[in-house]
C-alpha cells in the first residue's frame, strides 16, 4: 500500500514540474526590437501557420514602431505619441498613456524588470512602469530618436539623431557615457559579450566597450547605415545603403564577406540556422526582395519579390520567415526555399517589424492598426493562468486518486476477511 502511495506522489511531482515548465515557457517573450540583445530576429516559439486575424486594435494613428510582447501583454507606441499595453490574447486595452510632449514614437520598446524603455522624436529617452504606463524618468538628448534601445546589465543603450550612442543608467536615468559618431544614429544597438554594436549615417559600423564607451573598432561602408546589426556566433551581420549586406568579425571588425544586391538595405537581418534573412529596396527601385543568404559565405540561397520596398525586418520561427512590406502586405515564407506560405493585406504601408510569440505574429501598419495573426487556438493558451494554479489542480487530483486507492485497498482487505 505504501509503495502505491509513494508512486502516486512521485507521479504528482513529475507532473507538477512538467506543468510549471510548460506554463513558464508557454509565453515566449519578444522583449525588444529584434527579440533579443543579439538582435537575431529568431525565436524557438511556435510559428504562426495561418493568416487568420486573431484580433486587431485601432490606435487612431499611423504606427512605425514594432511590438514588444512580454508575459501575455503587447506593448507598442503610435506616431501620435501614445503608448499602449494590450492583452496579447484578445487585443483588449489594459492601459494607455500619452507623452507629456506629444511626439512621434517609432522607437520600439525594450522591456526589462518591469520597465519599458524607448526613444521619441522629441529627443527624449523614456522609462515607463510596465504595470500602468507611469513615467519613471526621461533623459533629453540633443535631437530626435528613431533608434530602439537595448537594455543589458542595468544600462540602456540607444542612438540619437544628434550623432551619439548613449549609455544611460536603467534605474536612475542618469547618463553613464556617450560616444559621438560623425552623423545621426538610426541603427539600434546589439549588446553581446560586453560590447555594443551599431551603425551610423557616417557610413560606419561601430563596436564599443559596453562599460566605458571606448571604441574597439569601426568598419567603413560606402553609404549611410540605418540597418541594425545581428551578432551571432562571433559575426556581425548588417546592411548598408550602399546595397550590401556585410558580415564582419565581431572581435576585430574585419570583413568576412559582403553580398551585393540591387538596392538600399535599411532592413535589419535575422539570423537563424546558418542563414541570413533580410529585406531590400525603397519605393521606385527595382529591387524589392526578401533575401536568404548563406551565413558563412554570403551566397544567395533564394529571393522573394514583393511589390514595393522593404523597411521591415524579418522574424524567423519554426521554419517560417515573416516580414512586412511597404506595399501593405504581411508575408509568411518558407525559410528553406522562399516559397510563399501566406500573405495578409493591410490598408497602408508597413515598416513595423514582426514579433512572434506562442504561434501568433504581432505587427503594426500605417493603417493605424496593431495586428495579431495566426491561429486563435494558439493565442494565450496559458494566458492569465499561473503555473502554481495548475500545480494545485494536479495535486488535488492526485490526492483524490490516492484516497481512491486507499478505499479500494481496504475493500479488498475486508473482502478477504
Image: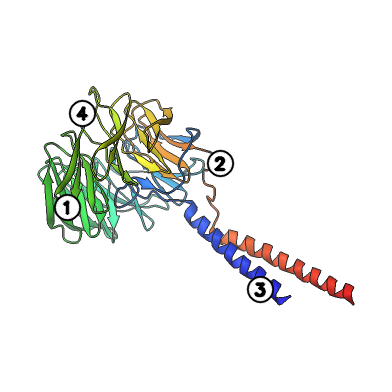
Give the alpha-carbon distance from disc 1 to disc 3, as whole Å: 57 Å
- Any mark on residue 262, and which? 4
Q: Which residue is mark 1?
A: 207
Give the alpha-carbon distance from disc 4 to disc 1, as whole Å: 27 Å
Q: Which residue is mark 2?
A: 377
Residue 264 relative to residue 62: left or right: left
Give the alpha-carbon distance from disc 3 to disc 4, as whole Å: 68 Å
Residue at image position (18%, 50%) is: 165
Give the alpha-carbon distance from disc 2 to disc 3, as whole Å: 37 Å
Q: Residues within 10 Å of mark 3 (few under 14, many from 20)?
A: few
Sequence-wise first label, 1 or 3? 3
Between 88 and 140, the residue placed more toward the observer is 88
Q: Is residue 228 visible?
A: yes
Residue 179 relative to residue 305: left or right: left
Q: Which residue is mark 3?
A: 6
Q: Quadrant of the N terminus?
A: bottom right
Between 375 and 161, the residue placed more toward the observer is 375
Amino acid at each position: 500500500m505504501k509503495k502505491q502511495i509513494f508512486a502516486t506522489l512521485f507521479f504528482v511531482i513529475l507532473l507538477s514540474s512538467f506543468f510549471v515548465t510548460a506554463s513558464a515557457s508557454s509565453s515566449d517573450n519578444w522583449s525588444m526590437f529584434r527579440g533579443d540583445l543579439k538582435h537575431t530576429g529568431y525565436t524557438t516559439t511556435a510559428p504562426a501557420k495561418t493568416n487568420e486575424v486573431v484580433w486587431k486594435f485601432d490606435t487612431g494613428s499611423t504606427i512605425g514602431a514594432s511590438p514588444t510582447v512580454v508575459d501575455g501583454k503587447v506593448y507598442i507606441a503610435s506616431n501620435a505619441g501614445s503608448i499602449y499595453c494590450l492583452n496579447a490574447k484578445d487585443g483588449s486595452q489594459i492601459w494607455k498613456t500619452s507623452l507629456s510632449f506629444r511626439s512621434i514614437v517609432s522607437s520600439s520598446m525594450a522591456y526589462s524588470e518591469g520597465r519599458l524603455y524607448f526613444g521619441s522624436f522629441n529627443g527624449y529617452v523614456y522609462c515607463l512602469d510596465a504595470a500602468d504606463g507611469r513615467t519613471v524618468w526621461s533623459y533629453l538628448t540633443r535631437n530626435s530618436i528613431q533608434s530602439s534601445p537595448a537594455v543589458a546589465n542595468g544600462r540602456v543603450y540607444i542612438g540619437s539623431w544628434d550623432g551619439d550612442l548613449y549609455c544611460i543608467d536603467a534605474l536612475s536615468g542618469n547618463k553613464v557615457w556617450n560616444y559621438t559618431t560623425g552623423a545621426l544614429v538610426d541603427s539600434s544597438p546589439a549588446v553581446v559579450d560586453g560590447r555594443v554594436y551599431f551603425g551610423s549615417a557616417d557610413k560606419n559600423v561601430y563596436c564599443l566597450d559596453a562599460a566605458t564607451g571606448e571604441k574597439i573598432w569601426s568598419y567603413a561602408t560606402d553609404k549611410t547605415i540605418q540597418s541594425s546589426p545581428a551578432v551571432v556566433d562571433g559575426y556581425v551581420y548588417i546592411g548598408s545603403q550602399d546595397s550590401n549586406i556585410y558580415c564582419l568579425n565581431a572581435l576585430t571588425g574585419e570583413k568576412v564577406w559582403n553580398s551585393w544586391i540591387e538596392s538600399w538595405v535599411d532592413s535589419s537581418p535575422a539570423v537563424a540556422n546558418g542563414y541570413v534573412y533580410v529585406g531590400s529596396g525603397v519605393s521606385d527601385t527595382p529591387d524589392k526582395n526578401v533575401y536568404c543568404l548563406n551565413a558563412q559565405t554570403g551566397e544567395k540561397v533564394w529571393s522573394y519579390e514583393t511589390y514595393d520596398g522593404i523597411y521591415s525586418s524579418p522574424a524567423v520561427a519554426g521554419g517560417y520567415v515573416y516580414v512586412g512590406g511597404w506595399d501593405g502586405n504581411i508575408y509568411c515564407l518558407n525559410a528553406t526555399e522562399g516559397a510563399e506560405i501566406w500573405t495578409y493585406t493591410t490598408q497602408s504601408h508597413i515598416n513595423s517589424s514582426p514579433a512572434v510569440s506562442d504561434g501568433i505574429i504581432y505587427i503594426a501598419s500605417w493603417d493605424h492598426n496593431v495586428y495579431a495573426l495566426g491561429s486563435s487556438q494558439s493565442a494565450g493558451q496559458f494566458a492569465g493562468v499561473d503555473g502554481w494554479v495548475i500545480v494545485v489542480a494536479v495535486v488535488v487530483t492526485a490526492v483524490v486518486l490516492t484516497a481512491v486507492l486507499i478505499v479500494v485497498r481496504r475493500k479488498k482487505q475486508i473482502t478477504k476477511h
